[in-house]
Image (cartoon, rainbow, N blue to C red):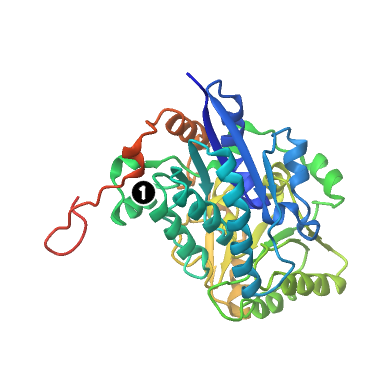
Amino acid sequence: MSKRTIAVVTSSRADYSHLYWPLRRLLDHPEVDMRLIVLGPHLSPEFGHTIREIERDGIPITARIECLLSSDSDIGMAKTIGLTTLSLADTLGQIRPDLLLVIADRYEMLAPASVALALRIPIAHIEGGEISQGAIDDRVRNALTMMAHIHFTSTHLARQRVIAMGEEPWRVHRAGAPSLDHLRHSQLLTTTQLEDKLQISLTQPTLLVTYHPVTVFRETTCEADALFRALESVHGQILFCYPNADAGSRALIDRANTFLSNRNNGRIFTNLNAVTYWSLLRKVSALIGNSSSGIMETASFALPTVNIGMRQQGRERARNVIDAPADSKAITQAIHTALSGAFRSSLQGMANPYGDGQASEKIVEVITNIELSESLLIKQARPLNPEGAWAV
């Protein structure tokens, strides 16, 4: 039998860290011809040129798609989707994979899913069924669910949501979040190694800030003022990670640089690879921001997390997360609580609802064994009960 060709799309540092272990397992699988398509922010020097990380990891790249406009507007985001679609039509048309694997909810992921749909290529989607009401990601995620033929959810509740959207239960698998596989399979850095690599000291209390534009709002940085006002009253070291390449990201980068110019104990990092980032999560005092990482990943370290504003509203969370509205006083109080010994002690023995670090095995097992026939492409509508809901 010939090998099964599986194409995988990665567009940014964030989804690559989630895809790393599925990619590794697909690459090592004797019956798979894995084709990696790299696009968007990965190829942008402004956002760290993270394609070099993929190259250093030794994962072969089939196609490099230049499609990210150097823009800080929603029009730029919309045009990026169009450029990506045009380029991927040629790329996927040439490869004609047996299956396309996409992940999560970045707006540019609409492009590969749309092209695959037109080319009758089955789609497998990771991390559907979640909720993040403060970002257009929420609608993108649901659109990808509707276009996909196989689903891998991070939680049991997310699986139920995907089924409630009308998907046949046999198509929907609860795998866990593949980013957590780094805890089982990657060697995290020691404190000394981390300090040497990042040229920082972790002897003092350190906050890690991971904050992105709130893309559901017309003014995507409107909640940022409250964050920076709250940070002004925080003692200790403050480290920033670059935001996603969304409308408003450059304004947030400028704001963070201006903030740090008035302090002598802080840094901003354009890009941190997965192992470095996870190692930092293990060592900092708390994470502050509105990133899904603060919901999905910090729970594995019982790391106190202050989740700010609208962006992650509706997403499942463990008890290490303290929600705060976009109000400087509320954020300051939440940070104070997060840094307290009592709150840290209360997190002992907590579990992460997003999985146990074995997602990649489950994902690869399914996509390498599922029957690739017309029945996979043809989704059956489930019957409605008298109340108009899907029958269980």
**Residue placed farthest to the left in the image?**
386
Q: Tell me if residue 204 comes above or below residue 193 in the rendering.
A: below
Element under disc 1: helix
Q: Quadrant of residue 285?
A: bottom right
Report crowding for label 1: few under 14, some 14 to 19, many 20 or more residues within 10 A (C-alpha). Answer: many
Q: In screen coordinates, is 25 left or right of 262?
A: left
Residue highlighted by disc 1: 159
User: Residue 269's x, y, as percent?
Assistant: 78, 57
Amino acid type at image mark 1: Arg
**Which of the pair 334/144 is nearer the observer?**
144
**Which of the pair 111/51 is nearer the observer?**
111
Residue at 70% of width from left, 79% of height from top?
Answer: 229
User: Residue 198's x, y, as percent?
Assistant: 83, 49
User: Residue 216's x, y, as percent?
Assistant: 53, 74
Q: Quadrant of residue 56?
A: top right
Residue at 48% of width from left, 61% of height from top?
Answer: 140
User: Residue 219's x, y, as percent?
Assistant: 61, 81
Residue at 52% of width from left, 47% of height from top?
Answer: 102
Q: Tell me if residue 317 comes above or below residue 61 in the rendering.
A: below
Q: In screen coordinates, is 262 left or right of 231?
A: right
Q: Tell me if residue 284 comes above or below residue 95 in the rendering.
A: below
